Amino acid sequence: MRKPQLSFFLAGFLAGIFLLLASATSFTLDRQPNSDYHVRREALAEKAGGVIVLFAPMESEGPNDLYGFRQEDNFYYLSGLTEPGAALLIAPDAEGKADKPAHSYTEILFLPARNLTQEKWTGPKLGPENPEAPKITGFDHVEDMAKLPEEVIKLVSSGAHPPIYTDVASHDQSSASAEPLEFLKDVNSFLIFLDVKPMIESLRTTKDAGELALIRKAVDASVAAHFAAFKAVKPEVNEREISALLQYEWGKRGCERPAYAPIVGSGYYSTVLHYSDDDKVMKSGEVVVIDAAGEYSMYASDITRTLPINGHFTARQREIYDIVLGAQQAAEAAFKSGKSNMKHEDPDSLYEVARNYINTHGKDSHGDTLGKYFIHGLGHPVGLNVHDSTDHSVPLGPGQVFTIEPGIYIPEENLGVRIEDDYYVDQDGKLIKLSAALPSKAEDVERLMAGK
Ligand code: GLY
Ligand code: MN
Ligand code: MN
């Protein structure tokens, strides 16, 4: 064999560098335009009226070890970046004071210096030295993480005691921002740290068009997965096989992970709300509750269907099934944009509509009404998190995405039924069922299970 030429090595080296840079600067998720994230940062700066500093978790602190690092929701919302260990600094326009210079809206993304040894394990990262970093990330400025203290001090130093808005952890939470901001206590022991999360979560309540498009992709992939499950549910099949099938089907359509632990609960376990063993053999004559959906480019979906394992509901199963579906339809029909909510004991509550429907239809085996078997809320917002935080003071209105998911769970009959769909309120206040393509009428469910 001929000796390789120097030019051959050089070409290979350059190709390697190119690939490395390309992979370090491309996004594996569907990402919204940089301008969408920029708009959110400016909105937050205006809302806070002060300096915001937020850290992404370190790679070793990712919330989901099983599927690898996942960016923290609020950091992702503001940046669209999956870089672990990054930080952002945002400050609104500020007039100058005697002891403090004026500045216009300021934003800096801080990236950790690249660690080539670590990158052998987890892949190339975008480094602060990359001259393209502002263009790639859409931040006005990108700096090395080592510059963060100096930049923060510049913005907060004054005679007064300005607050820093950051991720302040409550007793049962951890915060990626707490330890890296410790240095500020030495700079000014009177500095006040305020929690920025409620402000970001309030912005997250209303989804923009790009977010809605991603949620639609998560919903569509999950609907396709449920269609596949309709065909695969049969007596003597293990629940785990259905869980595996669902995950394969939405994964094939681009979802990076499940939006929550899939629930495939048959028989008695159809009545257990957060059952996740998914390991029983499904039996003829019982029902199975399938509450499972994928996450697409960080955005969740949340869908439940209840199927008769042998393809036909018994009369009693059908009775309960129709009451649950009726409750969902009653809530849909009662919806009023800008007025309806999910609170309990409120005149505009969709929960009360559904509960009232359940309480006025059917009986248990003791002749009692069924309301006491509806043991959870009617719905919740969906977004970057399957349970996006709920600001109950804001009624359901344009731009919001949420579930409507009534259920009846009667353990003594081994019978649980939940039907859950995802909804969006359009700009005209119309309620749009995003998961409408997945049938929920009992006869349609039976027809699809028969392969028709
Ligand atoms: N899958 C969780 C829920 O329905 O809220
Ligand atoms: Mn839900
Ligand atoms: Mn669910």
Image (cartoon, rainbow, N blue to C red):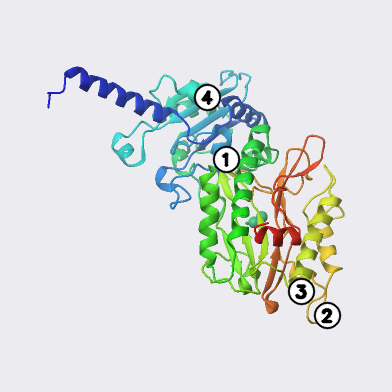
- Tell me the CA gap for discs 3 and 2: 14 Å
Mark 2 lies on residue: 367
| Residue 344 in view of the camera | no
| Residue type (three-letter) at the residue carrying disc 1 | Asn
Task: Give me the residue at 59% from left, 41% from top.
Answer: 194
Q: Position of residue 389 (x, y in %)?
A: 65, 48
- Tell me the CA gap for discs 1 and 4: 16 Å
Mark 3 lies on residue: 316
| Residue 394 in view of the camera | yes
**In the figure, is residue 409 to the left or right of 33?**
right
- Tell me the CA gap for discs 2 and 4: 63 Å
Mark 1 lies on residue: 74
| Residue type (three-letter) at the residue carrying disc 2 | Gly
| Quarter in which the N terminus is drawn | top left
Task: State which tag comes first along the sequence, 3 or 4.
Answer: 4
Dot 2: within a 10 Å radius of its alpha carbon, few (fewer than 14), some, or many (20 or more) residues? few
Mark 4 lies on residue: 139
- Asked if the residues shown at circle 2 and circle 4 are in contact, with their CB atoms under 8 angstroms apart, the answer is no
Q: Position of residue 195 (x, y in %)?
A: 60, 42
Task: Give me the residue at 69% from left, 69% from top.
Answer: 416
> Is label 2 within 8 A of ligand 1 (CB to nearest ligand atom)?
no
Task: State which tag comes first along the sequence, 3 or 2.
Answer: 3
| Foreground label between 2 and 4 | 2
Of 279 and 94, nearer the camera is 279
- Tell me the CA gap for discs 3 and 1: 45 Å
